[in-house]
Image: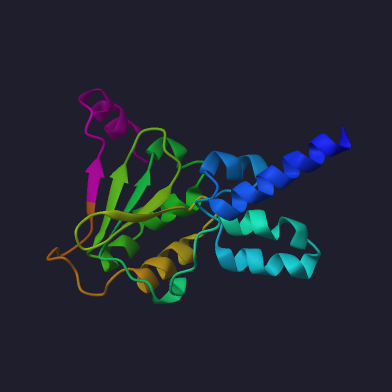
């Protein structure tokens, strides 16, 4: 029994050396591949968790430039108005004058969606998607001030886009707060 377990661990170790683990493999190990930065793996030694460091390194994403230095051409804040009661800070941000400060910010109402921010490059490709469920109003504003490119994309103010489904159109209009 012990020999079998040893060979299984040995085979797993060899596999990890040869190839990066899939998202499903990482999830089985307790890591979320899309959110795990390699700098976090380096900190495992501080907590006596050096035994899982090799698996962590196989699941991590290489750290790019610090988040404070990255800027994006455009952002889309997606939220459902039905979730405003659960996220009053997002409602407060949207209904205040704060979004008007960001000409390259688009607010999109998507039925049933928790609030997320999609960050896009100049060609309109989504580079990052962030959950903002725990952010307060000031954090949302500060994030956009830091990460959105200062020059607008030719728009004078932010835009609001409703869900494109005709069935949902009435729902969104009647459900607005």
- Whether residue 97 is visible here, answered yes or no, is no
Q: x, y percentage for residue 55?
A: 65, 53
At 42% from the left and 35% from the top, the residue drawn is 82
Q: x, y percentage for residue 84?
A: 45, 42
Q: x, y percentage for residue 149?
A: 27, 72
Q: In the displayed structure, would residue 116 be above or below residue 154?
A: above
At 39% from the left and 39% from the top, the residue drawn is 80
Q: Nearer the viewer, residue 159 or 170?
A: 159
Q: Which residues are magenta?
A: 160-177
Residue at the far top in the pictured view: 167
Answer with the quarter of the image where residue 102 lies: bottom left
Does the segment drawn in magenta span residue 127? Answer: no
Does the segment drawn in magenta span residue 170? Answer: yes
Q: x, y percentage for residue 100?
A: 26, 63
Answer with the quarter of the image where residue 169 lies: top left
Residue at the far right in the pictured view: 2
Which scheme is used to colour this image of the protein? rainbow
- Whether residue 56 is visible here, answered yes or no, is yes
Q: Is residue 45 left or right of residue 88?
A: right
Q: In the displayed structure, would residue 110 be above or below residue 118?
A: above
At 38% from the left and 53% from the top, the residue drawn is 117
Q: In the displayed structure, would residue 155 be above or below residue 130?
A: below
Answer with the quarter of the image where residue 3 lies: top right
At 46% from the left and 74% from the top, the residue drawn is 66
Q: Quadrant of the C terminus?
A: top left
């Amino acid at each position: 029994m012990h020999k079998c377990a040893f060979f299984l661990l040995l085979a797993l170790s060899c596999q990890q050396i040869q190839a990066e683990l899939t998202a499903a493999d990482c999830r089985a190990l307790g890591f979320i591949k899309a959110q795990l930065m390699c700098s976090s793996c380096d900190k495992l030694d501080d907590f006596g968790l050096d035994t899982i460091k090799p698996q962590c390194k196989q699941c991590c994403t290489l750290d790019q430039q610090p988040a404070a230095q990255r800027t994006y051409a455009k952002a889309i804040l997606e939220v459902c108005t039905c979730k405003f009661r659960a996220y009053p800070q997002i409602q407060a941000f949207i209904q205040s004058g704060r979004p008007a400060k960001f000409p390259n910010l688009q607010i999109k109402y998507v039925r049933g969606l928790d609030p997320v921010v999609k960050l896009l490059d100049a060609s309109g490709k989504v580079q990052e998607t962030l959950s903002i469920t725990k952010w307060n109003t000031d954090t949302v504003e500060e994030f956009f001030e830091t990460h959105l490119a200062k020059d607008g994309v030719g728009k004078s103010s932010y835009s609001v886009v409703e869900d494109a489904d005709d069935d949902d159109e009435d729902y969104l209009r009647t459900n607005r707060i």
